[in-house]
Amino acid sequence: MALDRSNPVPNDLSAFWMPFTANRQFKKTPRMFVSADGMYYKTSDGRDVLDGTAGLWCCNAGHNRPKIVEAIRQQAGELDYAPAFQMGHPKAFELATRLRDMAPEPMEHVFFTNSGSESVETALKIAIAYQRAIGQGTRTRLIGRERGYHGVNFGGISVGGIVNNRKFFGSLLTGVDHLPHTHLPGQNAFSRGQPEHGAHLADELERIVALHGPETVAAVIVEPMAGSTGVLMPPKGYLQRLREITRKHGILLIFDEVITGFGRLGSSFAADHFDVMPDMITCAKGLTNGVIPMGAVLATKEIHDAFMHGPEEAIELFHGYTYSGNPIASAAGLATLETYKEEGLFERAAELAPYWEDAVHSLRDCPHVIDIRNMGLIAGIELDPIAGAPTKRAFSAFLQAYENDVLIRTTGDIIALSPPLIIEKHHIDTLFGKLADILKGLD
């Protein structure tokens, strides 16, 4: 439908069933972005809105980056699509090599997907198939974590632990169990970085393994830092303990790094940041700077090579997607990784993290704030819910922030922030100055 350029909002909003959105509320008072550049979105009514969330945790290099835009333009005119099954094209192999070179050392192979959800499904399937390939076919059980988010496909919501993402969709996958979450506000409120208390929660894995028998468990999947559930940090020693227990029982450990990958914590991956090496890493979002859908699973040589047996002409893994390693997505990914490297954005995020931390915690005494959590260029600001109206207070803050030219994200009654890594100190000052005013005015 053509747009009236003086007011570029479609005349009919009814056809699009929007994801994770209060559709009726939105369509009464639409919030429309029509362009973006650097740290800012442009709204349909001509305002510049400071991006405090890197889109949806994905535009790590900011918006409208010339190298990425040009790479997509050139690739579309050269090779728009190549079959992903039994055929290849150079850029997919080049991108896989670049990813391998920047990933933690044990990760030597890359399987391309089109989203974080697909990356999780792929990693879970590889985990179960791997156990079968090495003669451990009884290992089919998967273990996730309460309040975990692993996308929205059936495997992801089964191992995930966010109630509303699960309860509407039936019994989900069988043979799944969950670790307890690590949120201990009574002991760890207003922690800076990793909280002191909670490493013992990893020992719950021993109880779950004993309950089901280690010979039945294929893999454990966790977010090193849980983002979508409200920015929950791993307690000191927690991830190390998970690694010890999984290795002891022959269980694969999968890190879901769809959010923490590509500089969000000041390093390539959270596995580097915490110095804990899993068996697989899922990623997406920042892989292409959010410009075009793409995800990946990074796997160790041990996992990959377990499938490389039998006749050479035989398919080793019966899994994949039409758009795995898509040429245009691969070009975008290569340009994105080059942008990160050329501009030193991961190092920049690490350097800015202390200034960001101080700014985040400056909100501690604002009304309704009951906890603040931060690491790298991420923050979670937890608000006291309105009695009988959970989520309303944070959603009100979201709407007011938009009206005051700032984009934030909310989950429950938690404000989550994750700006592009190109953010500067004056942007941080603006973001938290406006948030302070908004919080002071909330009911």
Image (cartoon, rainbow, N blue to C red):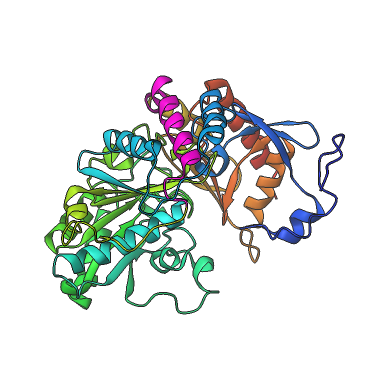
Residue 59 in the image, given as x and y percentages of width and height: 52, 36
Q: Residue 26, image x and y in percent?
A: 74, 54
The single residue placed furthest to the front in the displayed view is 313
The one nearer the camera, 198 or 158, is 158
Is 185 displayed left or right of 35 in the figure? left
Residue 166 forms part of the magenta stretch: no
The one of 221 and 134 positioned closer to us in this rendering: 134
Please tell me whether residue 397 is drawn above or below residue 65 in the rendered image.
Answer: below
Specify whether residue 204 is in view.
no
Please tell me which residue is depicted at 36% across the width and 61% down the height of the picture. Answer: 319
Residue at the image point whose x is 13% and y is 69% from the top: 135
As for residue 327 lying within the magenta part, the answer is yes
Q: Is residue 106 left or right of residue 323?
A: left
Q: Is residue 348 above or below residue 86?
A: above
Residue 71 drawn above or below residue 375 = above
Question: How many marks overall?
Answer: 0
Q: What stretch is highlighted in magenta?
A: 323-348
Residue located at (17% from left, 59% from top):
245
Magenta: main secondary structure equals helix
Identify which residue, 62 or 193, lies in the foreground: 62
User: Would you say residue 304 is visible in this rendering?
Assistant: yes
User: Residue 230's x, y, as percent?
Assistant: 48, 51
Give the x, y percent position of residue 331: 46, 34
Quarter of the image for residue 204 reads: bottom left
